[in-house]
Image: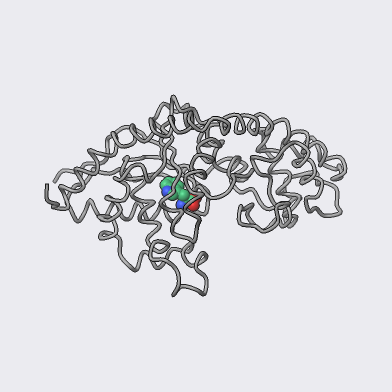
Amino acid sequence: MTDAPTYSGPERILSGMQPTGNLHLGNYLGALVNWVKLQDRGAECFYCAVDMHAITMPNDPGALPGAVRSVAAAYMAGGVDPKRSSIFAQSAVPAHAELAWILQCVARLGWMERMTQFKDKTGSDRERASVGIFTYPVLMAADILVYKATHVPVGQDQKQHLELTRDIAARFMRDYDCAGFWPMPDPIIEGAGTRIMSLKDGSKKMSKSDPSDLSRINLTDDADTIVRKIKKAKTDPEPLPDSVEGLKGRPEADNLVGIFAALNGATKEAVIAEFGGQGFGAFKPALADLAVAKLAPVVDEYNRLMGDPTDIDRILQAGAERAREVAAPVLAEAKRMAGFWG
Ligand code: TRP
């Protein structure tokens, strides 16, 4: 007996963010910084704005195209280079939706019912949730598999969706007897900044849906606003500990040290080595200076890009063309295996 063929195609990177509201420091340090680094890996990168996912929740259709532009500008301001990476809107590549249908018939209801994000998002109001919010992870699987992506940089909260993607790919290959057609995509979850927490509550993730703007630093905040938000960030009365272990049970201190480390591309150990024993009166101004120094160029570049939407639209157009080119043969093959006409 010979071994079943395994995937032998090129490495490809894919990720996406929802175009809802402004990006914040958590998106930047937790995701974008990784996306930018991955461009040096030599693999082709696809970074999309997932506007089809955005309509799974109540949203304003009039604001959606602008939100796609804004998120694309944020990708570029953060360092995604459109010459090396395809930047595009998910809805501009119909292959995502077409493959998602096939994959919906591969995924089992039982698998979907285990998805914790669906439960978190719908809460007790499940009856009124859209069907789209339930099948959301299958569309995400299609986003990934339609490019045969091998690596997917995501936050910790998306790990379960990546596991589902692998289950769907494996089941498809078994049902349609096509071992090796898809890679088993690997999540890339790394970096000190993977989990940036709220500035007001160290146990909650920094989020664009938090009602308090003081809880997050937006990529559109000017220097004064950044300084003010760090000054007002919640802390405890103790000075910083002498070792990283001392941050345990001090979520706000841990978060600020983590932000400092991530902004500096350093470890928490290095931050503690410099600031251990000092109070927040000394640490916060240093953090504010660093945040302004690192973020100001990003904010300036974002504002410059947003000043010329035609340029962004051109990049989105070119990115979608390249994405369609790569997705087309994968979709065609999946349709053929499913037995579709034509
Ligand atoms: N669900 C992801 C999030 O909320 C966004 C997303 C959609 C995504 N499709 C994707 C991420 C494909 C990685 C790959 O963050």
Position of 287 relative to 122 (above/below) = above
Residue 27: percent from left, percent from top: 58, 44
Horizontal arrangement in the rendering, residue 219 relative to residue 17 (left or right) = right
Q: Nearer the viewer, residue 245 or 225?
A: 225
Horizontal arrangement in the rendering, residue 107 relative to residue 244 (left or right) = left
Residue 212: percent from left, percent from top: 70, 56
Q: Nearer the viewer, residue 145 or 167?
A: 145
Q: Residue at x 34, y 36 (%)?
A: 323
Residue 281: percent from left, percent from top: 87, 43
Q: Residue at x 25, y 55 (%)?
A: 102
Give residue 33's quadrant in the image. top right
Horizontal arrangement in the rendering, residue 52 relative to residue 233 (left or right) = left
Q: Residue at x 59, y 45 (%)?
A: 22
Give residue 298's quadrant in the image. top right
Residue 232: percent from left, percent from top: 81, 50
Position of 316 relative to 338 (above/below) = above
Q: Nearer the viewer, residue 191 or 312?
A: 312
Give residue 12's quadrant in the image. top left
